[in-house]
Amino acid sequence: MARLVLPCKSSGFARAGLLGLISSVPTKCRVSFLENSARNISRYRRILTSETLYQRNRCFSYLSQARTRQANRRLICSVATESLQKLVEEPAMDSPKEIFLKDYKMPDYYFDTVDLKFLLGEEKTIVSSKITVFPRVEGSYPLVLNGHDLKLVSIWINSKELKEGEYQLDSRHLTLPSPPSGTFTLEIVTEIYPQKNTSLEGLYKSSGNFCTQCEAEGFRKITFYQDRPDIMAKYTCRIEAEKALYPVLLSNGNLIEQGDLEGGRHYALWEDPFKKPCYLFALVAGQLESRDDIFVTRSGRKVSLRIWTPAKDVPKTAHAMYSLKEAMKWDEDVFGLEYDLDLFNIVAVPDFNMGAMENKSLNIFNSKLVLASPETASDADHAAILGVIGHEYFHNWTGNRVTCRDWFQLSLKEGLTVFRDQEFSSDMGSRTVKRIADVSKLRNYQFPQDAGPMAHPVRPHSYIKMDNFYTGKFQFFV
Ligand SMILES: [Zn+2]
């Protein structure tokens, strides 16, 4: 995942620093920049000197403010993502719980297959899940599922509906006190309200489209699940919706079936053949059009590439498609890693609150990081698109196929993938200028954080809300 971090308007160096990511697309302005790169590097050095003084002064004032808050530092770190109002409104027993690294335990149950069905509607969405569950060790342990902002409709074990008293439900968990021994089938039907979901986690509706964001812990807002990265399963996803409103229905993996239904509705059935944690699940439904292309892998497989946007934006996706094909080729040439499916989708929507998300074979981006009009986009815009398209694509192997045990390992997938995208941008443009740009980001974003109350170790000892840790420490420099 990449946060959408825009350069600070007051920092000339931050703006100039992005130029280090310049791609090798042979446009006139970019060639002229590269010809002048030596002169520009010397100019950067001069800017760096003045910027150092500026940053030093800013840091001192920042430190002084931080010192006055030092007594509350631990408290601020712990509750930073929960607004005061929300904390006050929630009963004490529902307060967010601090998660400690030292408390990690392997799950008592694993999931093998997960079949999801979404009935998308204007008022509510019905989500049905059918999960094959098997115990890690024999014995009778409760199965605890995460769930938040969900309405439970029904729950079934081995095709038998459970009655009240056979399960426990609170505002964050669904617990089965004594599941059957051996492998069993768990079916859960929930009702969710994407139109009212303003958290932009889980499934939400924005600008007329349905869209998901599940990293780090958004899947629990879609259905009850063991929402942790060490639960990896094979997914299918069937989506049903009104065809006129949502002509495009996308999810992870390969499209294996689609067709029309009664009442102007239609469906699509997707199957992801590879195991994945639930934070990589994605669904998009809406009025989108695509730029299509093909990439032939080094083993000769044809991969269909599609970049989906609102129709008016399709002409602005040429550079993103170029970036994707370059990234796929580069990962084969440099790391020997070939794409593993026959279809790769990118969706760019204006209301995506993360910068970009590496959902398996269905990357979702904020439009800012995909769209570039040749008439108006700057070199920095082109460079940012190249780097982020590469970053999310590279996650296919570093993060998706090889994933984290728990969120304390976030820096493993992000750090390694950032290194890979930095190498990619270096190879596409100027290695030296790219390095200067990365160091400038470190100085502008990471140093102030490390000097302030939000400082944290690369691997934290505990967290309340993992979203707090998607910072420069993980995403730029590890
Ligand atoms: Zn990432």
Image: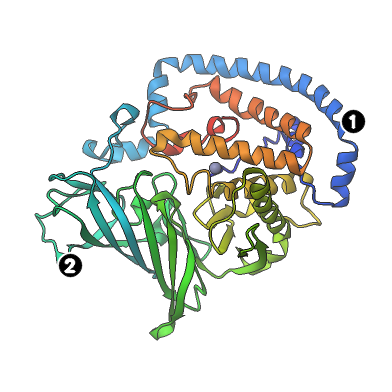
Tell me if residue 6 can be seen: no
What amino acid type is highlighted by mark number 2?
Ser
Q: How is the image coloured?
A: rainbow
For the image shown, how many numbered marks are present on the structure? 2
Residue 326 lies, with reference to residue 92, above or below; the image says below
The single residue placed furthest to the left in the displayed view is 165
Q: CA distance from mark 2 to mark 1?
A: 72 Å
Q: Residue at x 43, y 52 (%)?
A: 198
List the residue tagged with mark 2.
159
List the residue tagged with mark 1.
39
Q: Quadrant of the C terminus?
A: top right
Which label's residue is closer to the chain start, 2 or 1?
Answer: 1
What amino acid type is highlighted by mark number 1?
Arg
- Please state the horizontal and vertical placement of residue 337, each as a whole percent of the image: 59, 49
Say whether residue 318 is left or right of residue 42.
left
Q: Nearer the viewer, residue 15 or 292?
A: 292
Say whether residue 289 is left or right of residue 380.
left
Residue 309 lies, with reference to residue 19, above or below; the image says below
Question: Looking at the image, in which quadrant does ligand 1 appear?
Answer: top right
- Please state the horizontal and vertical placement of residue 425, each as a whole percent of the image: 71, 41
